[in-house]
Image (tube, rainbow, N blue to C red):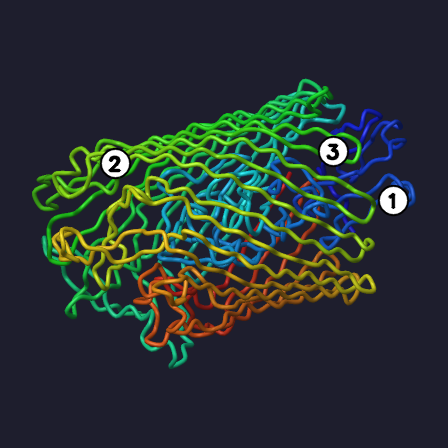
């Protein structure tokens, strides 16, 4: 048994004015001891202990006193009414939310040892992931993907005007090594967050600088992390330093990762045909494109890239009533090869000699103001003003063609969130407003790579610029009717305006209008009821609606969607917001203190859903795009569709050191076209995870399997984003992997030491995630070390 050093202890209680008070008390010393005032023990309160090795655990005052002020914690210490942020943008107890929710703690992130945030989500939650390249990872929640899933970091909305409807890799530009937790709200989230939250909300919460609560002048903590993985020669180094004083603190962090080419699994069944095999690749030799045989066809050549993340947070807390946080985040990649497009073949030859995303940049600067002081209209105000800058570019060159096409997008985003909380006896009221302004600029050109001569090229988005504005007002309410029943309800009004000036784009597409403008609005609501039979059994039901308003990507983009059957998507200024209505019911049950099971069933009705459909321009169904005749399509609003599914997860505690767990998710989606219901795209096959964890004397062992059912050809959407060209002739086969993780933790001479190793995909199985254009890693050995001092 080791002392828990550097753990943060906070206290939460309700005062005589029914105001929720949250107070930081102390940091544990080298003996795992902290001193708190006697008055704190007299409060009827909840004490929360937070540390990297255990995440966050909570105890009542009664429990602390009953245990003689000594708490013995393990990695499996049960959490009491864990506070989350995602549901209503303020801290709230999980039992009070009538939704399927999930939290990935700091401790889980550390032990999972995943290479990026997308892999973390797939390994540690019930989120499915699609990958077009190694430097990608597109989350799928309840059959929704891309700009129909909302990403939030530290309360700031990441979804911007060019978040596309296909597949998005933006989530891996978030540094998982600095996350305190990830909170996942499944289902409609538009009442609180507005547009895009149809499938759910992924809320990423980074760590907050820690103040000094000891008698010393300052508090200093350093953390270092290094990892190596064999299947792609990945190396990651992370360092962060926390400097804390009585009223202000600083947290600085930097992470650098290098990812080599991915080696896929060699153990492949005949059902995979030749999918994933990389027989050759292209190199430029003496100003000529030359095809080279790949000496190892299991090595996915040109899938390598690098990424660097930097973060700086400053906390100023002059009193318990006020708090100020300045948050700076910056992420930049090297060129990221678009691996799936590099494997396309045309007439027996590679279609592309080059296809890569240029260095992607993400910058966030935000100021967060919190005011905790009871007033007639509020108990707490939380305001966040933020600026974001995003740059992404696409570069491609056809085989034996010297002209390199380059398209670059730069997006500047300003946003403001104001959230107000008020407690009135058994009622909790949250209301506020948010606004976001997006400015989009696109440039494009072609370069003759031998002479560096340049000439014009059509831009991805309107050449003379675009902008998008979003404004919303909301109010939500929780009512603890009695100890058995809790009611959730809320309503929101949103207004969205978009404007695009095509300008020079008309030189390439004269059939388009000179401007594309649209204004839309949406009214959203939710109603939920929770029944708490006792502390072991909980039932919840919820009815809510959500929407996705057409953004600049939906309204004004021209791009090639299908590289095999050449197809382009052109603007449709008649698009209206797509709507969803979701009903769900779920249970949380604990039997004999050792068996926990959670279930959820939902049904989502889609109205005016966006679907890619063929159209004609000037009585023709094809036009020239990037030198090739291409079928013309556009996003259209189809009448209706539906998505239904269910989820179950369970945990069995065999004894204090050994437990078993498992999860299973099923999704089905259909869209109505020409009076018939056909498969909806973005619907993954059934998938899940079964594992066993053992902890003993500083060691932790995790043996688990991840698996996926087959996706039959008849279940694919042939005109959508399911990427059938990268599957087999029968669809995507089923697969499973076996995996083993081991961790040893100790504390010596004031240094917390965490040694980790493991092997993923033990059987070296070949598999590919549904709709992906790159095969997953084969057998992968990894080793990592974490030091804290």
Instruction: Work out whether mark 2 precedes mark 1 in sequence or the reverse, and give the earlier one.
Output: 1
Q: Residue furthest bottom?
A: 270
How far is the residue under mark 2 from the one under mark 1? Answer: 59 Å
The residue positioned 59% from the left and 50% from the top of the image is: 109
Residue highlighted by disc 1: 63
Q: Secondary structure at mark 3?
A: strand
- Please report the residue visible at 53 percent of the width from the left and 51 percent of the height from the top: 581
First-in-chain label (3 vs 2)? 3
Residue 16 in the figure: left or right of residue 183: right
Taking depth in this image into account, of 780 and 441 the one nearest to the observer is 441
**Who's the residue at 10% across and 39% down the image?**
455
Q: Nearer the viewer, residue 647 or 761?
A: 647
The residue beneath circle 3 is: 27
Identify the disc placed on residue 294: none
Disc 2 versus disc 1: nearer the observer: 2
Q: Quadrant of residue 126?
A: bottom right
What residue is disc 2 on?
A: 442
- Neighbours of disc 3 within 10 Å: few (<14), some (14-19), many (20+): many
Residue 187 rendering spot, x and y as whole percentages: 56, 51
Mark 1 residue element: helix
* Number of numbered callouts drawn: 3
In the image, 523 versus 772, the foreground residue is: 523
Picture coordinates of residue 554, whole percent (x, y): 33, 45
Q: Is residue 574 positioned above or below 466 on the image?
A: below
| Residue 222 location (% of width, % of height) | 60, 36
Where 181 falls versus 382 (above or below)? below
Please report whichever mark, 3 or 1, sits nearer to the chain's N-terminal start: 3
Marks 2 and 1 close (CB-CB < 8 Å): no
The C terminus lies in which quarter of the figure?
top right
Q: Dot 1 surroundings within 10 Å: few (below 14), some, or many (20 or more)?
A: some
Q: What is the secondary structure assignment of the residue under circle 2? A: strand
The span from disc 3 to disc 1 (Cα, nearest Å) is 20 Å
């Amino acid at each position: 048994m080791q002392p828990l050093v550097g753990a943060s202890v906070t206290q939460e209680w309700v005062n005589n004015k029914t105001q929720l008070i949250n107070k930081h008390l102390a940091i544990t010393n080298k003996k795992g001891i902290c001193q708190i005032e006697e008055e704190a023990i007299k409060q009827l309160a909840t004490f929360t202990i937070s540390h990297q090795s255990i995440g966050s655990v909570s105890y009542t005052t009664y429990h602390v006193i009953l245990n003689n002020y000594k708490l013995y914690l393990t990695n499996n210490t049960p959490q009491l009414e864990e506070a989350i942020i995602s549901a209503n943008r303020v801290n709230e107890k999980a039992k009070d939310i009538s939704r399927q929710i999930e939290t990935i703690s700091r401790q889980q992130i550390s032990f999972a040892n995943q290479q990026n945030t997308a892999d973390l989500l797939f390994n540690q939650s019930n989120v499915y992931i699609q990958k077009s390249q190694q430097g990608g990872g597109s989350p799928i929640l309840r059959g929704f993907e891309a700009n129909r899933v909302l990403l939030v970091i530290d309360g700031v909305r990441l979804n911007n005007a060019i978040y596309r409807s296909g597949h998005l890799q933006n989530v891996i530009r978030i540094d998982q090594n600095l996350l305190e937790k990830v909170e996942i709200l499944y289902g409609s989230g538009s009442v609180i967050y507005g547009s895009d939250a149809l499938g759910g909300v992924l809320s990423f919460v980074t760590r907050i600088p820690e103040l000094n609560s000891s008698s010393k002048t300052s508090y200093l903590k350093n953390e270092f992390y290094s990892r190596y993985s064999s299947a792609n020669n990945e190396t990651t180094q992370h360092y962060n330093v926390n400097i804390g004083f009585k009223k202000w603190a600083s947290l600085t962090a930097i992470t650098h990762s290098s990812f080599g080419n991915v080696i896929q699994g060699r153990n492949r069944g005949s059902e995979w045909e030749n999918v994933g095999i990389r027989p050759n690749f292209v190199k430029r030799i003496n100003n000529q494109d030359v095809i080279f045989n790949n000496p190892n066809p299991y090595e996915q050549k040109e899938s390598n890239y690098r990424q660097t993340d930097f973060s700086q947070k400053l906390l100023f807390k002059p009193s318990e009533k006020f708090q100020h946080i300045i948050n700076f985040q910056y992420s930049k990649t090297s060129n990221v090869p678009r691996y799936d497009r590099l494997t396309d073949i045309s007439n027996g030859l590679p279609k592309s000699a080059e296809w890569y995303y240029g260095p992607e940049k993400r910058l966030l600067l935000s100021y967060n103001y919190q005011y905790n002081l009871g007033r007639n209209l509020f108990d707490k105000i939380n305001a966040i003003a933020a600026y974001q800058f995003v740059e992404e570019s696409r570069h491609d060159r056809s085989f034996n063609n010297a002209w390199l096409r380059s398209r670059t997008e730069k997006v500047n985003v300003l946003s403001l969130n104001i959230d107000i909380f008020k407690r009135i006896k058994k009622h909790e009221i949250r209301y506020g407003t948010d606004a976001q302004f997006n400015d989009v600029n696109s440039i494009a050109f072609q370069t003759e790579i031998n002479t560096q001569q340049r000439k014009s090229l059509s831009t991805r988005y309107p050449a003379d610029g675009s902008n998008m504005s979003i404004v919303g007002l909301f109010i939500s309410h929780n009512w603890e009717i009695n100890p058995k029943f809790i009611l959730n309800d809320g309503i929101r009004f949103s207004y969205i305006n978009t404007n695009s000036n095509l300008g020079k784009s008309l030189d390439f597409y004269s059939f388009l209008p000179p401007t594309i403008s649209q204004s839309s609005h949406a009214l959203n609501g939710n109603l939920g009821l929770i029944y708490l039979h006792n502390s072991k059994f909980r039932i919840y039901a919820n009815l809510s609606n959500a929407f996705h308003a057409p953004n600049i990507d939906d309204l004004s983009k021209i791009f090639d969607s299908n590289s095999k059957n050449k197809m382009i998507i052109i603007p449709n200024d008649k698009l209206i917001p797509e709507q969803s209505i979701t009903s769900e019911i779920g249970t949380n049950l604990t039997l004999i203190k050792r068996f926990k099971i959670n279930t959820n069933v939902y049904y989502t009705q889609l109205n005016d859903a966006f679907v890619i459909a063929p159209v004609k321009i000037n009585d023709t169904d094809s036009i020239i795009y990037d030198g090739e005749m291409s079928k013309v399509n556009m996003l259209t609003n189809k009448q209706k569709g539906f998505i239904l599914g269910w989820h179950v997860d369970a945990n069995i505690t065999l004894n204090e050191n050994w437990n078993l767990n498992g999860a299973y998710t099923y999704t089905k989606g259909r869209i109505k076209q020409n009076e018939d219901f056909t498969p909806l795209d973005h619907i993954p096959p059934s998938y899940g995870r079964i594992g066993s964890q053992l902890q003993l004397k500083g060691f932790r062992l995790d043996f688990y399997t991840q698996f996926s059912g087959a996706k039959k050809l008849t279940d694919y959407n042939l005109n959508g984003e399911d990427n059938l060209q990268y599957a087999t002739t029968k669809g995507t086969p089923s697969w499973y992997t076996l995996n083993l993780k081991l961790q040893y933790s100790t504390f010596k001479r004031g240094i917390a030491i965490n040694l980790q190793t493991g092997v993923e995909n033990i059987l070296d199985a070949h598999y590919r995630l549904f709709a992906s254009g790159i095969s997953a890693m084969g057998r992968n050995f990894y080793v990592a070390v974490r030091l804290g001092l």
